[in-house]
Image: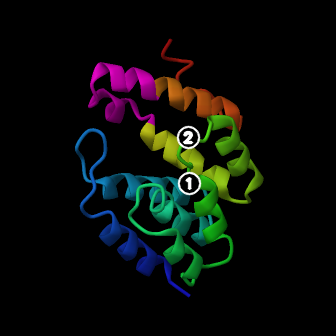
């Protein structure tokens, strides 16, 4: 079974050439999500899923790799739950997250980092507005507190 340090190293290598919408190394986002899961009391499986949460969706790793990888129980299921399918609506996506044990904590950490005002400030206005709306919608669908309530 892959250890947490091995999963971190694998995720860092798989995403090494990718950047986020602001041009920052994508691995910074993965590290922030994993740390957020750890800080929220997440299990090792949830931290592993945090490192891998965008790997299939972003094309860094294949579904075949995920299917064959020797992962701790629950990791594969969380990663699949967190993988938004092309054209999938947010209601179906969030319902899958809510139905998968452990996935909500990982998504909450992902949203917390994505919605960080400093991170959003680095984006152009239209992208910032679009993502702020999307993140607020996902928060509501997941039953999480609205991080924007205090801003408006």
Q: Quadrant of the N terminus?
A: bottom right
Q: CA distance from mark 2 to mark 1?
A: 12 Å
Q: Is residue 94 visible?
A: yes
- Percent across and percent down for residue 93 are 65, 44
- Reply above or below: 8 against 3: above
Residue 147 seen anywhere in this rendered image of the structure: no
| Residue depicted at x 61% and y 70% | 76
Q: Nearer the viewer, residue 48 or 67?
A: 67
Q: Name the residue: 42% across, 81% down.
A: 6
Which numbered circle lies on residue 43? none
Residue found 52% across the figure and 29% down from its top: 134
Query: What are the residue bounds of the magenta stretch?
Result: 115-131
Q: Residue furthest top?
A: 152
Q: Which one is in front, 36 or 2?
A: 2
Q: Which residue is mark 1?
A: 83
In the picture provided, is 103 more to the left or to the right than 18?
right
Which is nearer the eye, 44 or 9? 9
Label 1: state its secondary structure.
loop
> Which residue is under mark 2?
87
Q: Secondary structure at mark 2?
A: loop
Is-magenta flag for residue 65?
no
Which residue lies most toward the front here?
87
- The main secondary structure of the magenta stretch is helix
The image position of residue 116, as x and y in percent, is: 41, 35
Determine crowd level at label 2: few under 14, some 14-19, many 20+ residues with C-alpha closer than 10 A.
Answer: few
Q: Quick one: label 1, few (<14), some, or many (20+) residues within 10 Å?
A: some
Tell whether position 118 is magenta.
yes
């Amino acid at each position: 079974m892959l250890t947490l340090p091995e999963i971190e190293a694998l995720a860092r290598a798989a995403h090494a050439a990718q950047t986020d919408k602001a041009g920052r190394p994508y691995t910074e986002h993965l590290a922030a999500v994993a740390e957020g899961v750890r800080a929220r009391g997440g299990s090792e499986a949830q931290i592993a899923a945090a490192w891998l949460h965008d790997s299939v969706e972003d094309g860094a790793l294949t579904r075949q790799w995920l299917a064959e990888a020797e992962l701790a129980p629950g990791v594969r299921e969380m990663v699949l739950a967190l993988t938004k399918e092309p054209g999938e609506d947010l209601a179906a996506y969030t319902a899958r997250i809510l139905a998968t044990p452990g996935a909500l904590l990982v998504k909450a950490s992902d949203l917390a980092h994505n919605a960080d005002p400093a991170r959003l400030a680095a984006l152009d206005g239209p992208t910032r507005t679009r993502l702020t709306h999307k993140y607020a919608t996902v928060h509501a669908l997941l039953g999480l507190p609205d991080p924007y309530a205090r801003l408006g």
